[in-house]
Image (cartoon, helix red, strand yellow):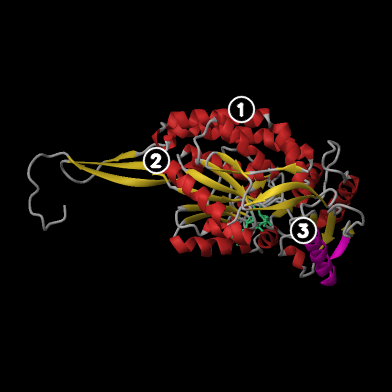
Amino acid sequence: MQRFQCYIDGEFLDGEARYQSIDPATGKNWADMPEAREGDVDRAVNAAEKALYDGPWSKMTATQRGKLLYKLADLVAANAQKLAELETRDTGKIIRETSAQIAYVADYYRYYAGIADKIEGSYLPIDKQDMDVWLRREPIGVVAMVVPWNSQLFLSAVKIGPALAAGCTMVVKASEDGPAPLLEFARLIHEAGFPAGVVNIITGFGASCGAALSRHPKVAHVAFTGGPETARHIVRNSAENLASTSLELGGKSPFIVFADADLESAANAQVAGIFAATGQSCVAGSRLIVERSIKDRFLNLLKDKAEAIRVGTPLDMATEVGPLATKRQQDHVAALIHKSVQSGARIVTGGQMPSGEGFYFPPTILDCDGVASPSLAEEFFGPVLSVVAFDTEAEALKLANDTRYGLASGVFTQNLTRAHRLMKGIRAGIVWVNTYRAVSPIAPFGGFGLSGHGREGGLAAALDYTRTKTIWLRTSDDPIPDPFVMR
Ligand code: NAD
């Protein structure tokens, strides 16, 4: 059984307790993991605080920080295959996706390496004589980062990259489900030469480790990716010391297809949008809103494509849909389908939990037209598409916005003016037009409503890890006049 450790204050440690991680393809234990509890959390946060104010990191120039980030990017690229295999093994995400995604993670670190020495302060044209006033941009402080199981290297890179560029120090909590790739990534942080305590990487359970981290009095900001219910716990805990938060949460993203769209392209994008990562993607286009005149034709196209998907073992390069990450997730998907069918949703394909080992679930399409199906409102985080039809553009927009979430959306049409109207009308942080699921380190990413707040990616994300300090310097040598008048 493979054994992993936490990384605290530049050292690899076993953690206060141990637990075993399950291979989702077999349902059997495969790795021995450290379980950080309150004591480890406290050690890690203290190490991060010391590194922020006292260690060599606090004295480095932004250019030096950038050089370390470039080195880290190169190490991620060189180790991408190994990291991908670990992520596939520990979370069930197919190797085809993890290898491409982790190679791209290196580009995220490279992007933020270039940002490090471009975070500037400013000089203010102040309305007073003999006064110079500047804004300094300083690191926000010790950052707690809490990530879910899916795409842990990617979801942590969009936090660690900008936070390091800004000069912060951090404690990263990997999900208890599938922490292997992030714990292994700690070795690259070490090898790149980041001083001890700058990046600490631990794992443990949400209610103990995650809660202790998000309420720790020395944490200035909590960057969280996960579900809205956990986000509420995080916000309540962070309120204890009034830490700021950025929240990247779930979604129930609309995917709108008009009759004039290139249906073959739209169908491929829809298949990727809902079945990639076995549907365990925050931006999953899980609500298909299709023009009624093409509904049957488009559903037939989707059904054929869904039934041709190769479901299988995630370490095989030919596999297109692997298992779900946990038994809990598999049961949740089955229960929500059952509830939806009881409410009137019709199964177009899939829908049955397979017998046999591993947490597999087949690509599933539910026709929910005219039905108040719970599958239209609740996140599956699994390979299940819910379909409704519309007759007018206004109806399509109303259906798209009929959700408390607001992360992503897709619009497929050849009509340019209509596309522009929908771009403005859709209430979501991302609108993809005639494409879906494209991301880049240069483009901000984040949601509205229950999908959270704060943006990851882009320059603004690095600025979010800074706080400003206003400096006033009086340039006159004359004595200060009337001390009782504010100047
Ligand atoms: P989750 O909210 O259950 O867990 C996420 C993390 O929070 C884990 O590390 C967990 O240990 C920790 N946690 C749990 N309880 C906690 C507590 N009380 N205090 C502090 N930390 C706690 O999420 P999940 O089920 O692992 O992941 C799926 C969710 O993540 C979905 O809703 C999905 O949409 C969302 N997600 C969002 C994005 C995005 O960028 N918007 C990306 C990926 C996943």
Q: Is residue 266 above or below residue 318?
A: below
Can you say which quadrant of the picture contains the N terminus? top right
Q: Earlier in the sequence, mark 2 or mark 1?
A: 2
Q: Amino acid at mark 3?
A: Gln
Magenta stretch bounds: 328-347
Please name the residue that numbered disc 1 is placed on.
74
| Tag 2 and tag 3, C-beta contact below 8 Å | no
- Pick the front one: 300 or 262: 300
Please name the residue that numbered disc 3 is placed on.
329
Residue 294 in the magenta stretch? The answer is no
Helix or strand or loop: what does disc 3 sit on?
A: helix
Q: Amino acid at mark 2?
A: Asp
Picture quadrant where residue 268 is located: top right
Queried on whether the Cβ of the residue with tag 3 lies below 8 angstroms from ligand 1, the answer reads: yes
| Tag 2 and tag 1, C-beta contact below 8 Å | no
- Pick the front one: 259 or 150: 150
Please name the residue that numbered disc 2 is placed on.
54
